[in-house]
Every structure is written in structure tokens, then in C-alpha cells.
Image (cartoon, rainbow, N blue to C red):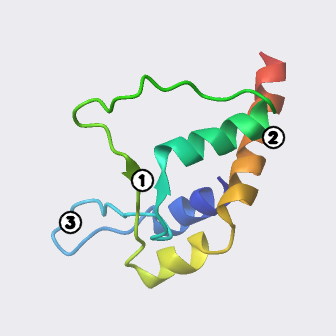
Amino acid sequence: VTDLARLMLMMGDETDPLGDIRVLDAGTGQGVTVSDLLHQLFSLYSPGTKPAFIGAEKLGDPSRLVARAVDPVVASVLSSTPLMQGLKAYVDWFKVERAHD
């Protein structure tokens, strides 16, 4: 989350040559399955709990999430935090925020 927030601050005022706001594919290029990502989040949030799947993909749902950073600035910012470390930081933040509700 911190990496992405820092990236958004760095790129916030940039526009493309046509004057449109830039859209960045902000990721490391390393694919992760939706199932693996959810299993990791569940294990961090509530160890022993597992996500349930219906056993069939819905039309249009991605089976893998892959985002590549083609901009060198984006790549350098987002490559600084490993996925599990970032997920743990996100879950820790979420638990604190949820406790305040």
C-alpha cells in the first residue's frame, strides 16, 4: 500500500502528450492466481480460515492477476516490497482500521 501511495504521489501531476491523465499498469509483472492471493490474505487475516470457491469460473473473471510496470519509475517503486510483506502490511492496517469502526 505504501509503495502504491508513494507512486501515486510521484505520478499524480503527470499527463500524457495529448493532455489526458496517464493510466499506469502498476505491478511487478509477476503473476499470482486469484486463489493463491485469497489464500494468502485469509491466512494472514484469520489463520486456519480458507476461502471457498464454487468450482467454476464465471465468464469474465480473471484466473490470474498480472500487472506489468513498463515505466521505469513505476517499476523501481513497486519492486521494493515483496508480495507477502505488502499483504501483511495491508492486513495489519485493515485490522487497525476495523478496530476503530
Residue at x-position 68% and y-position 66% = 82
| Front residue of this view, candidates 4 and 59 | 59
* Residue 34: % across, % down: 48, 44
Q: Residue at x 71, y 57 (%)?
A: 84
Q: Which mark is residue 92?
A: 2
Q: On the image, numbered disc 3 is attached to which residue?
A: 19
Q: Nearer the viewer, mark 1 or mark 3?
A: 1
Q: Find the residue positioned furthest to the bottom.
A: 72
- Quarter containing the C terminus: top right
Q: Which residue: 40% across, 52% down?
A: 64
Q: Determine which residue is flagged by label 1.
A: 65
Residue 98 location (% of width, % of height): 77, 23
> What is the C-alpha distance between the residues marked 1 and 2?
22 Å
> Which quadrant would residue 60 be assigned to in this image?
top left
Relative image position of residue 61 (x, y in whole percent): 31, 37
Disc 2 secondary structure class: helix
Residue at coordinates 69% horizontally, 34% vertically from top-left?
Answer: 42
Above/below status of 82 relative to 60: below
Check disc 3 and give the amino acid type.
Gly
Q: Are marks 1 and 2 in contact (CB under 8 Å)?
A: no
As shown in the figure, which amino acid type bears the numbered disc 2? Answer: Asp
Relative to 72, residue 32 above or below: above
